[in-house]
Image: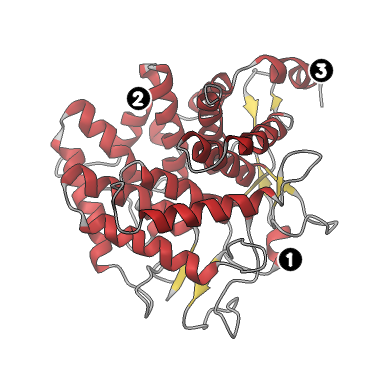
Amino acid sequence: MNASETNAKHTDQDTRTPLEWAEKACETLMDKFEPEQLPPERFHYHQGVFLSGMEKCWQETGKTKYYDYIKAWVDSHILEDGSITKCKTDELDDIQPGVLLYSLYEQTGDERYKKALYELVPLLKSWRTNPSGGFWHKGHYPNQMWLDGLYMAGPITVQFAKTFGESEYADMMANQAILMEKHTKDPVTGLLYHGWDETKEASWADAETGQAPEFWGRAIGWYPVALLEMFEYLPEDHKDKAKLVEILQNLLIALVKYQDPITGLWYQVVDKGDLPDNWLENSCTSLFVHAIAKAVRFGYLDSKYLAYAWKGYQGVIDTLKLDEKGDVVIGNICIGTGIGDYAHYIARPTSENDLHGAGAFILMCVEMSLAQSVV
């Protein structure tokens, strides 16, 4: 670590507010990429989660540069007729960025954005499903439900239901969330396995349950983050709301038991922190912190759980560095991964300022800024 990085460790981490860290991360990526160049080149959740964090930053700060950046990226993919360029319409990962269209439609009234939403969300009505009706995560993964999928399709779909008065879409995603938890939950730990194959044909599927073999941190993180986004648009009297709240509470309460007591971070494979080759991972920690703090803010968890969120937040902040330009470097982010065994997850490389890791970090920071007003 050079002198400037050491100085960042002992000074900036101590003085920046959570919202200032969120802005710092936004601006670091804005400096690196013109919006049209955000990787990968297609309409994909890597950009979607990063820009969703930026959208929350814009909402909290009112700074139009964030809105303008989001709009520029979206406009680079949305054609005049509302069709979307470079979008894989059999992968849930490419549905998620459509969540950015709501604010743009609200701000501009441009019908392109509404048309694009009607290009994306109705795809789910004919989505391929396993025998129980669970969405395939991708077209080339037959019958596989992944926890990640709820974040990719849940918030955009429930918001669609409320925005356009199409309530069957809310019912659809509530059912997906319940089905997913039912078949991935471990009764001993309360944690959720990364995925489930009802046919048990996937190489990783347990011969008895069809479940994935491990509790991968970031996959678990997407699930409560998605539920909390869905709750912003799901009617309070929805028939499944109470069940979904119970699922959220049970998962978050289970997770706090696995927080590393020294650093405040969570492990790549959540329940195996005692194994010497397991490692602490920033993106899952960011998602867990965001979800715990937001659940407290919404009244789903007792305020005592904020202590776990603040400990996790500080743990991530303590890992940050600043480069020679003064940009923030967020490390210890697992690159994307399929489902596998323990050795598979442990061997995954890490990255710095990866978009979905940066997005998780920004989501955490904005939520912890809001948490400062929670008594």
Mark 1: few/some/many CA within 10 Å (<14, 14-19, 20+): few
Which residue sits at x=59%, y=85%?
207
Nearer mark to the viewer, of 2 and 3: 2
Q: Tell me, what colour scheme is on the image?
A: secondary structure
Q: Of the residues under marks 2 and 1, which one precedes in the sequence?
A: 2
- How much space separates mark 2 and mark 1, taking CA atoms? 41 Å
The amino acid type of the residue labelled 1 equals: Ala
Amino acid of disc 3: Ala
Going 38% across and 61% down the picture, which residue do you hit? Answer: 91
Disc on the earlier residue, 1 or 3: 3
- Disc 2 target residue: 67
Residue 145 % position (x, y): 46, 68
Locate residue 110, reporting x and y percent. Answer: 16, 32
Identity, as a three-letter code, of the amino acid under mark 2: Tyr
Q: Which residue is mark 1?
A: 343
Q: Which mark is on residue 3? A: 3
